Amino acid sequence: MSNPILKVENLHVNFNTYAGTVKAIRDVSFDLNEGETLAIVGESGSGKSVTTKTLMGLNAKNASIPDNSRLLFKDKNLLALTEEEWQHVRGNEIAMIFQDPMTSLDPTMKIGHQIAEPLVKHRGISEKEALARALELMKGVGIPDAEEHINDYPHQWSGGMRQRAVIAIALAADPEILIADEPTTALDVTIQAQILNLMKKLQKESNSSIIFITHDLGVVAGMADRVAVMYAGKIVEYGTVDEIFFNPQHPYTWGLLNSMPTTDTEEGSLQAIPGTPPDLLEPPLGDAFAPRNVYALAIDSREEPPFFKVSDTHYAATWLLDERAPKVTPPKQILTRWAHWQELQGQEA
Amino acid sequence: MAANTEDFVIVGAKSSDANEHIAKPALSFWQDAWRRLKLNKLAVVSMWFLIFILGFAIVSNIFVTQNDANSFDSDNVGKYKNLPPKSGLPIPGWNGKIKEPGATESTDPYANSNVKKNYLFGTDTIGRSLGKRVIVGLRISLLVAISATLIDLLIGVSYGVFSGWKGGTIDVVMQRIIEIMSSVPNLIVVTMIGLLLGSGVTSIIIAIALTGWLSMARQVRNMTLSLKERDYVLAAKSLGESSTKIAIKHLIPNMAGTIIVQIMMTVPNAIMFEAVLSAINLGVKPPTASLGSLISDAQSMLQFYPYQILIPSAVLVLISLAFILLGDGLRDAFDPRASED
Amino acid sequence: MTEETPKKLVELKDLQLYFNKGKSNEVRAIDHVSFDIYEGEVFGLVGESGSGKTTIGRTILKLYEPTDGTITFDGKDVTKLKGKQLSEFRKNSQMIFQDPQASLNGRMKVRDIIAEGIDVNHLAKSNDERNNRVQELLDLVGLNKDHSSRYPHEFSGGQRQRIGIARALAVDPKFIIADEPISALDVSIQAQVVNLMKELQKKHSLTYLFIAHDLSMVKYISDRIGVMHWGKLLEIGTADAVYNHPLHPYTKSLLSAIPVPDPEVESNRQHIDYDSSIETDGKERTMLEVNPGHFVLATEEEAAAYKLEQQ
């Protein structure tokens, strides 16, 4: 097992609003290992974006983080940094790729300069050297005829090309952690495929760690080494990508997997999760997913489930894994996935 | 854990009532804006100040008439003229004492001329109560402000919405008209109207009517251009809603913030415009007082009787400042960027 | 679709919509597009941004004026509708929008948003009747009673989209154009909305034009699919045919790009790049029927080649 480069421990984030305190992150802990891609999956409002903003020190003014929360990056607690120290970390050691390439580039600045900027700032090299490096980066992210386009402005480029430029900026200072917040949601599927391939290729070359935030399990399947599923400000299940896709244990993960039609989804068999995610102004008592869970147990509405161990790498927070719980039969599609898991296990043994 | 077997019984998902519950209190757009406005203390103070001033100006009609403020006792001009403000309290500068021109010591003109009445804000050069004259001037300023607002709303908003909604050639022509009108200096317009109708409040209001709504119309037209492409407007169209209804139900409520902020800019401009016109004798006709004419009348005596110019100036500045501060607060309150928290 | 010929509800014939026609910056948003939508079916229209799919939807609803070509709805030429016939058409065809945030007027209560169509068409005689109708519609889309007095910004994306659906259903339409109704929603909520739309289609015997860029969802909900690119319709056929036996290289490329929630499939997935020269080489191409009911925009030779490929 490789060493964790980032350890998140007992993270809580609250937002103080006029209507009360929104408990956006409620006790999240995870590790990020060197060179791996960790996908954080969840719906809007699950806290996945707040998690990344916290990792970048970019939370809104009304956010409050209790003292026992810790973000350990190479044994340094990021939450204790001053704004000045943050500026050294941000873009240098931890970089971010934003969702919308239309708004994350400065429209009044030449793209080459935007890529060179973090280099001048963090590496202290000259403008000329930085521009030369920017050109290399542009070639690296697959921008054709980079020499001709280094002096272009963002509006001259298509969405996919712009996202490539955003990636080049993020990679400029050779960050150890790359946070990608829904980097392909705003793009067309064919462009999405290209960008994802590019990210995979670049990660292989640089061996950086990626935290990949998305709501699309299809993207996760192709990108991630490990997956954490978030719901209502908590991680409800985490494990390796195979474990999550072929041996899911949490009913919410079942629901997510079932919500995506595949080639052989028969008419009328697409199973949606009923209802709407809970309002984190008043998070429900016990298991937050219980009100929408067809497999909910009586205890769910009273007591929060702890993490149950499925394997060394796989944990799920659901009472269904308690030995006293009745055996439930998951939906058909999940059973098919479980069957495949058995096959895989059989092959290994 | 005191869990027993009943705890591990499948109960299933809750009803949609529980699932779709929204915890935040229901808050309309206006309530939300009011909540944010309240965070800006200066704006709230300004708002109450303006409400108070407006109420005071309306009520003052009962006890201070125009005649009251204009008439003076021609036999006793010497006795009543240039009396300094007297509060009846020993506050320096507000105790009825003043250094007469040429004198070295402060004297009490009230005692010297045997005046029994206390003039809270003093009197002017012919013995009229400055307080009463300021109240009348205030009324005129507010009248101008209200007319400017109404004109902005009636002409500016409807012109802008119509121009933006129709688009095409109509829009081009209507925008050119605005440009031509705004290229004519206001002063020329006022002078022309003054020549036609004679100077006075009416011609000031007409002058404002002719020019004051232009920037509102421009703003509203720009907003309309962007709002009319919104999905909810398309939805209303596809439901068969008429253009007038779309304007009233969808366009105007969604630019309410812009409109209100624009009014808050127009109002102090209009008040200042009136003051300037009155000061250069293009505004109200004497003996009617307006804040501008009071200031210009007192100018010559500035060195000797500074209170005569300070009091109307202070009122003018306070009102304009209150409008500007309130406008600032309203802009923040309506700013959609701040609406996330 | 093979039993007694079903009735054509919407017919597009050689539809064209050019912006800045004849100028150097001419944009062919819709470029000679023809297709039919049969009563009771779900017709899926797929394409990437800028393909003209949204423009087609809006043109059918008379929100844009076509440059040339005809749109027939229920046997009547839509472009020539006026007065009473127009308001009848407005009642019969409705739209569900992409961005549930932008499609609801933030200054109006949910009750008034949903009742807008009822008010316009005077469908309720009294206030009570209006409220009851709104209540029914909220029930239908799975929302609560107390939601009717709230404002759109208090709802989540999925809830807002359901409000949009309720608004469209308020006038009892026959035909609904759903313009990317799920692309702004989370995956788990997408399934919810799609299932709701399916259910409503059965209950109210609706016809849908379902516009999307997500082929997997379109395949799931649609009976037939049309694929668009750069204003042209490239391929049209039953959902199964287009999805499992695509003809046009663009369709193939599009299909190869869809991520599948299966790590094994994903690790072996090869994205097929699309060579767009097949659309820009200037050759005359028409819609040719390669298999029964499965058309592709091609020259005779290309069509023959596609047919061969299939075997």
Image (spheres, rainbow, N blue to C red):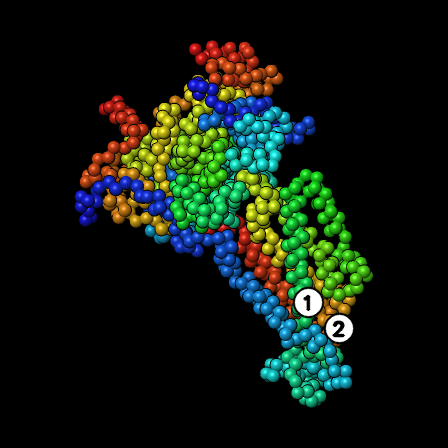
**Which of the marked residues, 1 or 2, is nearer the chain's N terminus?**
1
Q: Is residue A311 above or below residue B219?
A: above
The residue shown at (49%, 50%) is B339
Q: Chain under label 2?
A: B
Q: Which residue, given by chain and number where applicable, does mark 1 sit on?
A: B140
| Residue lying at 30% horizontally and 33% vertically, measured from the top left | A248
Answer yes or no: is residue C49 visible: yes
- The location of residue B127, given as percent across then percent down, is 72, 80
Q: Is residue C244 above or below residue B208?
A: above
- Answer above or below: position of C2 versus B324: above
Helix, strand or loop at disc 2? loop
Tag 1, which chain?
Answer: B
Amino acid carrying label 2: it is Pro
Q: Measure how far apart labels 1 and 2 are at the Cα level.
A: 13 Å
Image quarter of residue B313:
bottom right
- Horizontal relation, residue B86 to residue A336: left or right: right
- SS at mark 1? helix
Q: Position of residue A18 (x, y in %)?
A: 44, 56
Task: Tell me: C101 left or right of A5.
Answer: right
Alpha-carbon neighbours of circle 2 within 10 Å: few (<14), some, or many (≥20)?
few
Q: Which residue is mark 2?
A: B287
Q: Within the image, what quadrant is residue C222 found in?
A: top left
Foreground residue, B93 or B169?
A: B169
* Residue at 61% from the left image edge and 83% from the top image edge: B88
